[in-house]
Amino acid sequence: MANELELVNRITNKIFTIRGQRVMIDRDLAELYGVKTMVLNQAVKRNIERFPIDFMFRLSKDELKELITNCDRLEKLKHSPTTPLAFTEHGVAMLSSVLNSKKAIEINIQIVRAFIQLRQYAIAQRSE
């Protein structure tokens, strides 16, 4: 149970608010799933009809610049030829069906728990 909580907390630190939505970027998701970012993005591209704009969008250069400014660990993205994809909670849930592996399903459960934890925290903050 402690490992699960640790993983949820690690995932929570990879969730950003962009365009008013909580999202995770492709690089972080690929790392969690244990695949290369290119592999994750290819799976998405092959199943693009499963990812409408409210499930996934590509960051603008300005959004990427702001993300890098706020998160030092993403410094490597500064020189990337393309901007990353950002996945909303629903897009992340859809990824498990596209990647179709046991690990993807297990990680997705933890990611959904992290999104729920953030939502509960936000609700608690509003009611105080």
Image (cartoon, rainbow, N blue to C red):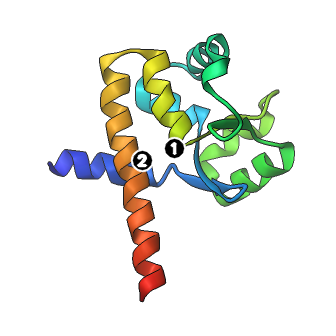
Element assignment for label 2? helix
| Residue under numbered circle 2 | 11
Indicate whether 59 appears above or below 96.
below
Residue in view at x 61 percent, y 19 percent = 44
Give percent across and percent down for residue 87. 60, 38
> Closest to the observer: 126 or 9?
126
| Residue under numbered circle 1 | 89
Q: In which quarter of the image is residue 109?
A: top left
Residue in view at x 51 percent, y 44 percent = 89
Residue in view at x 38 percent, y 24 percent = 104
Q: Which amino acid does label 1 sit on?
A: Glu
- Mark 2 or mark 1, earlier in chain: 2
Circles 2 and 1 in contact, beta carbons < 8 Å: no
> Closest to the observer: 72 or 3?
3
Q: Name, please, the residue furthest toward the top.
A: 46
Whether residue 72 sits left or right of residue 98 in the image: it is right
